[in-house]
Amino acid sequence: MSINNGSRSAAARPGSWRRDILLNWKIYLIALPIIAYFIIFHYLPMFGIVMAFQDFSPIKGFLGSEWVGIDNFIKFFTGPSFLLILRNTLVISLLGLVIGFPASILFAILLNELNQLFFKKTIQTISYMPYFVSMVVIAGLIIDFCSSNGIITNLLVNLGMKRQNLLQNPSYFWTINLISDLWQGLGYGSIIFIAAITNVSQELHEAATIDGAGRIKRVIHVTIPGMLPVIVTMLILQVGMLMSVGFDKILLLYNPTIYSTADVISTHVQRMGIVNMQYGYSSAVGLFNSVVGTALLLITNALSRKYAEHSVF
Amino acid sequence: MKTTVKKYLLLVLALIVVIAAFSGCGTTPVTTQTTATTTGETTTAGPTTISTEEQLTFSIWLYATPNDYYSTYSENPIVQYLNKKFNVILEFQQPAAGTEQEALSLMMGSGQYTDMIETSYYTGSINSLYQEGVIMDLKDQVQSSMPNLMNLINSDPTFKRNIYNDDGQLLKLLTLSKNDQMAWGGLVYRKDILATMTGGNIAFPSGKDVPTTIADWEYMLPLYKTYFEASGMAEYAPLIIPAVGYFATGELVSGFGVSPSFDVKNGQVEFGPTQPGFYNYLKKMKEWYDAGYIYKDFASRTNDLFYLPNTSLTYGAAAGIWFGLSSQLGDVMSMPQYNLMVDVQAMPSPLDTANNITEAPYRNSFSRYPTTGYVVTTKTKHVERLLQALDFLYAEENASMSGIGLTAEQVAEINNQLYIKNGLEAGAYSVDAGGKILRNALLLTGGALASNAEPFMNNRLPGYRNDKADNDNINEDIANGDKIWKTYDDSKNMNLFMTRTAAEDAVFTEKWPAINDYLNTMVPGFITGSQPLDDTSWAAFVAQLQAYGCDELTQISQATYDRYQSR
């Protein structure tokens, strides 16, 4: 008896999950490490949320640390950094969402329209490559290129800009971050959309061509509607991660002179929690971040279900 | 058949993954081992007899000590010597360089402490650690297990004053010395460039041989700029300052009559960044930055150590003034292969004589009373064995191990391969008929201690330090540097023996991060011009620091200072 047969027979009798486990115990066993991983690294640490409501002391532990209620949250909301880091987090994320997300879709469509296979494959490979370069290397390159004698600075100086270190001027950080994000993630981000395009029926394209539709009209009326479920799914996931900007990259790039535009919630948590050992406070900030992220995910999913008739769950 | 084989292969793979996933779980290794009984030695030095029959392992957290010879301090020859002599294993846990503070915070947060922790990177209160039960009061243990340390404490009232806290507890093991340390670093300048630019007629406005005033610096800086520009260097720096815009140890800013943190004037603690002298410092730095005298990219160099600012510029002969090391003094940075002879000389902080400043005492302290040390955690078992081993380094006759290294006999005793493989079978030093300590020539460069000599000695574990070797082996440049960097008496500085209570520490921990963040953001901003600097913005800056609570922290610092004075 094969595994699949067993599975089907179990499925035929609702409620017989014990029987299903018995029949497919090898599959369940294979799944066990993944389940264990999620329990150990994603669910058990959730007990740490209690730190957000404590003046947490590692030696006293969860049970012995002083309970301070919502004091840590009040400290964060009334603190000098709250509005600044919230603004920076949202702006950097929204720039990625508004510009970076459509750019990947556009790039996928453009690639799909290429007929010369060798050229298409070459462009794809070149565009994927930066994604696999270590973030430390990427940050090193950006810092070097943006220094007062860097290649990008020299280019801009030739265009009339005053010579300066671009990463010491708060006005430029969002742009530098966005452009480097696009450079690193555009190609890799487009993979899922290219896959979605390949699933669009060729017959629809042929029918549209017969009806007199040109390339642009076929993209608008055939390709994009065909990609829509994937676009909506990805959009919902992106919105859910709106509060989680690229922490490692910002940490590697920023310096105190540009905190006003570069300091985000995650770097603030790192400085307060890890460097200054304010565990309770940084847990409160982290919890706030997660709650807002989850709320955004649920709202976007609901709106998408209502208006676009697609949703993740 | 094939399907069955696949099934069982999958089953085995799944089991391996499950086992591997849980392999990291469980308790940390027990620190006490009972496997070997090598020496069976018993000490008779202390009031109580401590058996060394059982081999014990002690874990020690220490910051990174990168060198060319070994990756962990566990391999240090003096550590190896203690291991052998006292039948222990001192096992060091060291983070990667640059990640010390994060690594220490993570360890403190996890509650998985090592037996002993070096506290240089700990920013909180040691008293709080004791009150929370993380570390132990070693007062009684030291009395019974560390006779050599007790002798030192009883021989010097200042040792006693520093080693016990306000409540009479002994929480930290310190390195002790009866002499001031040799100054290992301070402000330096390239004298060869000045000579080149003036045809050998260097004439500082102060009339002195060494630059000592702001006017002297303003004589030097344009010369450096002209020199570097004329040599066609794409990247150069007449002056390098740290990313936060000031030297945290006080050099340079001290010349304006303030420190970058809390300092003492006539018994009164003040917060330097709110004082007029700090405003004068900012105005001068901005003026110099705008004139191209300060390294343009200084604010983005957040990963540089304050005493190793942009090494590519300093070692690339493209810097005029920086915070240098004693090992850089003289002509050691010359590059004869490029026909480049470099002359690096020491100088004190320049006095802002225009504002009647006559001394610059807030500098890196080279006092004989060091401010860092080790705490022993409450999880440590058999603490008497750990203290017994460390006490060996507090004996006057063993002091040469710290700062010099092993003798030929000691090398042979433990058959130390590091010494042997590097041609040091004769030990790190010998003593001549006149009692003068002579370092092994292999550890010297140009008459001074070689930069790669440190791995052969103990500069990290606490103990009694013999500075005689430094004085007996010093070259003229370093002796001169030592004198110049100690131009101003630093005894009025706040020191870390002034300890905060747990309540005071709670306030400090809450308020200091915002003040520190604000300072680190605004000071480089003022200097680079991204923040306007005028009377209005200065007043707003001071008001903001006060709003963050700097006055309250000043009061706390005053209380700690007063308690220390009355110890």
Image (cartoon, rainbow, N blue to C red):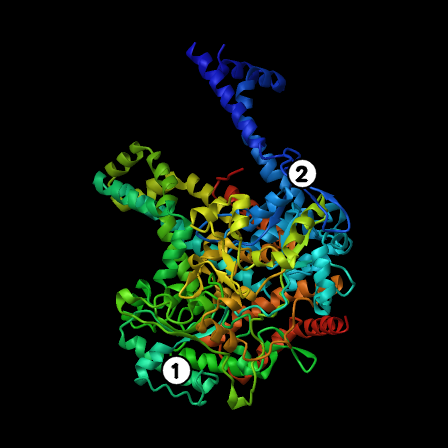
B15 or A11: nearer the viewer: B15
> Residue under circle 1?
B220
A236 or B75: nearer the viewer: B75
Q: Is residue B16 above or below residue B46?
A: above
B562 or A174: nearer the viewer: B562
Tally the marks.
2
Q: In which quarter of the image is the N terminus of chain B?
A: top left
Circle 1: element type = helix
Q: Where is residue B138 in the image (x, y as percent from the top left)?
A: 74, 54
Q: Tell us which disc is closer to us: 1 or 2.
A: 2
Q: Mark 1 lies on which chain?
A: B
Q: Which amino acid does label 1 sit on?
A: Met
Q: What residue is rendered at 55% in x and 18% in y?
A: A24
> Residue under circle 2?
B40
Q: Can you name the residue that lies furthest to the front here? A: B433
Q: In which quarter of the image is residue B343?
A: bottom left
Q: What residue type is labelled 2?
A: Gly
Q: Which chain carries label 2?
A: B
Q: Position of residue B300 (x, y in %)?
A: 44, 65
B25 or B420: nearer the viewer: B420
Circle 2: element type = loop
